[in-house]
Image (cartoon, rainbow, N blue to C red):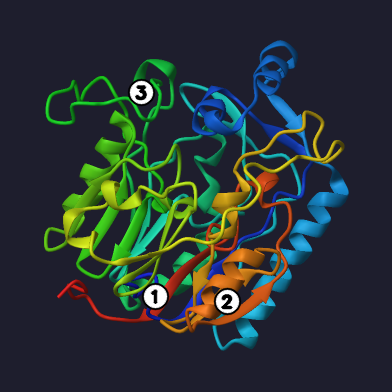
Amino acid sequence: MISSNTSFGKLKSVIVGRELEISKRVADFTFQHFYGENLTHAVYDRLKHEGEEYYVNHDLLVKRNQQLDDLSKKLEELGVKTYRPDHLSQVVTIKTPDYKTELSAASNVRDVSLVYRDCIIETPTYVRNRYFENTLLYKVYNQLFDGGRGGKWLKSPNNRLVEETMDLTPWNTKRDYENFDRNKYTMAIDGAQFLRIGKDVIVNINSYNHYLGFEWIKSLFPESNFHIVNVADNHIDGVLICLKPGTFLVNPKYRNIKELLPEKFKSWDCLFPDDYQVEPVIEQGMTDIDIQLASTRGMDINIISLDEKNVLVNEKAYNVIELLDNKGFNVHTVPLENCEIFGGGIHCSTLDTQREDEYIDYTK
């Protein structure tokens, strides 16, 4: 059954990702643009002069997949039914009319799908090698869809990920979404840009591609209220998590978050973990170019709520654990290491498919 209106209703079922079982990673211009703020000049130079690829330490891959398996088991122990994508242990070449690339695994399953109301929506990806990523989830989606008895299953229109159709200006550049050439850009937005709070949905938009993808998704839910914000270079769940009605967990880098929130949410409590290491120090040998795809700050708040009282947190997110414990939450922990290398924490690595919640205005 497909049913989820919020990020905090009682979690009944969830998908837990699997990491790519191949060391090679594709890093073309779409990848470089998407992760731009987290890549160093040295990384850019290496990708430019030595090819658009890099390699992850194999032992690190094995450990990551074991920890994702353990995450799935932990959720099962907490009473949540879990689903898993198919394994991807060999190179699968993708060829479209515009480019050639290699398929990524369904690791950060939150990214290229959105579950809202009774719908699974396969969103238009921003990164080329993720174009067919959801084929690894076909069996899961087909089971949940159950011939229409379980809900709806939609896939976005095909997009063209070529440079002339991509908005490559910096993410925090001011844009005029009312007056731009819609024929120039292709739609591209991830499910992880949407924060669902019942009838309200906060959406992080930082490109014309995002806006076109947002317009398509918004058209599917005419009774919902969508609120545009511009708070992050890539995903909103590294900045803002809704723990329950009236309470957000916020990345401590964003002390000014209330200035950025929609008006109706400015009165809600914002919980900031004590500040911690500004950015992670990537140990040499983890990858061949010492790459990172996210920051420690974003990964520590990247948690999943089991309900309005219980949360699942990375066991090394000490400041987040302390904060939530002091605020009366029941904190459950699980190890998930090297989230910066793999570009996803617990929230990114999971996609809730069923919650017991309501489609209402939670601000009233």
Q: Amino acid at mark 2?
A: Thr
Q: Amino acid at mark 3?
A: Asp
Q: Earlier in the sequence, mark 2 or mark 3?
A: 2
Residue 167 bears which disc, if any? Answer: 3
Report the quarter where the C terminus lies. Answer: bottom left
Few, some or many C-alpha atoms within 10 Å of disc 2 (few <14, some 14-19, many ≥20)? Answer: many
User: What's the distance in space between the residues labelled 2 and 3, CA to CA?
Assistant: 37 Å
Look at 48% across and 84% down and name the residue there. Answer: 328
Residue 138 left/right relative to 294: left
Few, some or many C-alpha atoms within 10 Å of disc 3 (few <14, some 14-19, many ≥20)? Answer: some
Question: Helix or strand or loop: what does disc 1 sit on?
Answer: loop
Residue 238 left/right relative to 118: right
Tell which of 121 and 72 is nearer to you: 72
CB within 8 Å, label 2 to label 1: no
Q: Earlier in the sequence, mark 2 or mark 1?
A: 1
Tell me the residue that label 2 is attached to. 82
The picture places residue 259, in percent across and down from the top left corner, at: 27, 47
Q: Earlier in the sequence, mark 3 or mark 1?
A: 1
Tell me the residue that label 1 is attached to. 8
Few, some or many C-alpha atoms within 10 Å of disc 1 (few <14, some 14-19, many ≥20)? Answer: many
